[in-house]
Amino acid sequence: MGKIRVLVGKPGLDGHDRGAKVVARALRDAGMEVIYTGIRQTPEDIVNTALEEDVNIIGLSILSGAHMKLCEKVLKLLNEKNAKIPVFLGGIIPEDDIPELKKMGIAEVFGPGTSLETIISKVKEIAGTN
Amino acid sequence: MQELIDKFKNGDKYALAKIISLVENNINYAWEIIEKLPKPDKDIQIIGITGSPGAGKSTTLSKMVKKWVEKGLKIGIIAVDPSSPFSGGAFLGDRIRMRNLSGKENVYIRSVASRGSVGGLCDSIYDIVDVMKAFGFDKIIIETVGAGQSEIEVIFVADTILLVLSPNNGDEIQLFKAGIMEIADAYIVNKMDLPESDKFILQLKNTLSLESDSKSKVILPVSAIRNEGINEIIQWIDNHFNDIINSGEYKLRKNRRMKRRVRSAIMRNIDDIIESGDFEFENLFDLKNKIMNFICEVNNNEEN
């Protein structure tokens, strides 16, 4: 297997991407090739980019509160395209929503305060090379 | 593998994506994979865009591609960004400037990390271009890493070289330096909306007029964010390909490319030997001889 390719994307309308950039940078420094899509992407954009770029894993960052709908849509589109790309999520996600997100098929949820080391090792594990 | 190739032949972009990963990661099998793909039935123009970071390569490119797509052309883009020499990781961010192209049926964008190559591209670029050619694009565009003064590998890969400059990037002395300033077929001067742009164009004209073959070099002023000057660029690019085919220059460039490609394939194998071998690096003379012997042995065996 080659390098781990990760897509870091921000679906939805919130325009704050400091967290997504910090995570993207940390994954870069951990030796991964990070494709950063920027803010205000639709689930269609994200899934299309992930497939065009042949990434191993997708990371979404959502603060707006629309995480349930957006994650559901991304997973549905991936499913429709028959793409088995795991998705992890970061941002402001209420604890109570996490079990349902995981049930939906989100591989991991990183809330505020998660250390970068934790994110890196989990991403490597999910992408299948740890 | 066969299933993937069948999908590729049917125009499935995602199969194209998978095959690019295969040749990118399996340098030694890349040619075997490419051998299985359809052969393009026409000459496809490879356009290289280079220039310093922030000059506006991605923005200009996205505006150009939009025009071609409106004309019904199918465009493939390879956007190269640097890999870290320390971690080997990369931050590939050129898609942000091309978001108006994302999801368009006739456009495919692939972000590629340079993975240790120092010429402004990546080692597998020739193979990736071959895969893209087989897919049936009308034009293929390569955007180099934000290049400095000596990242000039793109002249070997592309038929048409565009150097994107911007008026706020150093003084006149920069224009006199060898390397990247020499390789362009056309100089795109972006950010013409900046106040110092007219002076910059004048300096560039003066510099180019000192060169003997300057009549073949073109200056194209644009303001990519204002979408000005884009029609002129794409018209020039379309003409350039016909010009070099008719003048015989295309054949020369193709020949130069093939030589470089073979050389680069051999160099990669030598790199593999050096990286994987258990050599005594204290004695460099001995090491060099061992490697030369190894290569000659391979040669002799193949001759016998």
Image (cartoon, coloured by chain):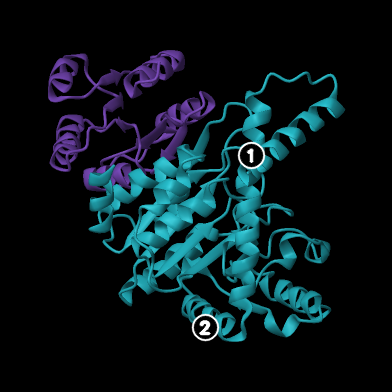
Specify the farthest residue to the front.
B304
* Label ID, residue B89: none
- Chain assigned cyan: B
Q: Are marks 2 and 1 on the same chain?
A: yes
Residue B168 lies left or right of residue A59; in this view the side is right
Seen at 66% across and 69% down, the residue is B184
The quarter of the picture where residue B222 lies is bottom right
| Amino acid on which disc 2 is placed | Asn
Q: Nearer the viewer, mark 2 or mark 1?
A: 1
User: Disc 2: which chain?
Assistant: B
| Neighbourhood count class around disc 1 (C-alpha, 10 Å): few under 14, some 14–19, many 20 upward | few
Task: Return the residue at label 2.
Answer: B242
Residue B294 vertical placement versus B6 (above, below): above
The answer for which chain carries disc 1 is B
Q: Is residue B47 above or below residue A100?
A: below
What residue appears at the point 26 percent right and 61 percent down from the top-left corner?
Answer: B105
Q: Amino acid at mark 1?
A: Asn
Q: Position of residue B54 (x, y in %)?
A: 59, 54
- Quarter of the image containing the C terminus of chain B? top right
Q: Is residue B203 left or right of residue B146?
A: right
Residue A117 is situated, as x and y percent measured from the top left of the image, at 46, 14
Nearer to me, B196 or B29: B29
Q: Secondary structure at mark 2?
A: helix
How far apart, in angstroms, are the residues tagged by discs 2 and 1?
44 Å
Q: Which mark is residue B301?
A: 1
State the residue in front, B53 or B161. Answer: B161
Q: Secondary structure at mark 1?
A: helix
What's the residue at 84%, 79% (across, down)?
B210
What shade has chain A been given?
Answer: purple
Quadrant of the image containing the N terminus of chain B:
top left
Packing grade of label 2 (10 A; few <14, some 14-19, many >=20) is few
